[in-house]
Image: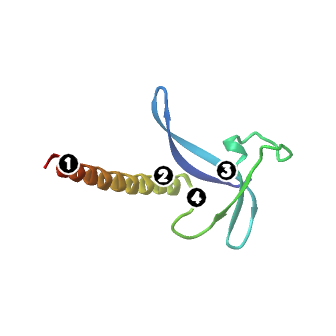
Amino acid sequence: MMKLYRYESANREDGIKICLQEYYVASETPKGYWISTAFHFSDVSEDTDIRKDRWVQKEGVNIFARTTRQAALHDFRCRKTRYKQIMEARLLELATIFDLLDA
């Protein structure tokens, strides 16, 4: 059975962890895949009520999960780089606000 991969970070009691999530492909279409998320548990049967399906496109920029671990890791790095840029811009904005308050 085919799998798709996505890296995610999780803030836990013992620190930040990087986790590789694996999603089984339930079916394939010409433009994408239907994946079974099942709340990230791969051993949940398809008959279970907690199973959720999600459609993932094959090509494009914002793809939820990738066909290889390397591509998933690259996407994770890109997502976190963009997140860092956004947070740095917000910190700069806050510094400017505090400078204006202190003036």
What residue would you read off at disc 1?
101
Residue situated in front as seen by the camera: 50 or 90: 90
| N-term mark: 1 or 3 | 3
Q: Earlier in the sequence, mark 4 or mark 3?
A: 3
Q: Position of residue 6 (x, y in %)?
A: 56, 51
CA distance separating discs 4 and 2: 9 Å
Q: Is residue 38 left or right of residue 21?
A: right
Residue 81, image quadrant: bottom left
Numbered disc 3: secondary structure:
strand
Q: Which residue was labeled with disc 4?
A: 66
Query: How packed is label 2: few (under 14 Cα within 10 Å), some, or many (20 or more)?
Result: some
Residue 51 location (% of width, % of height): 77, 47
Which residue is denoted by mark 2 in the rendering? 73
Q: CA distance from mark 3 to mark 2?
A: 15 Å
What residue does disc 3 label? 23
Crowding at mark 3 (Cα within 10 Å: few <14, some 14-19, many 20+): many
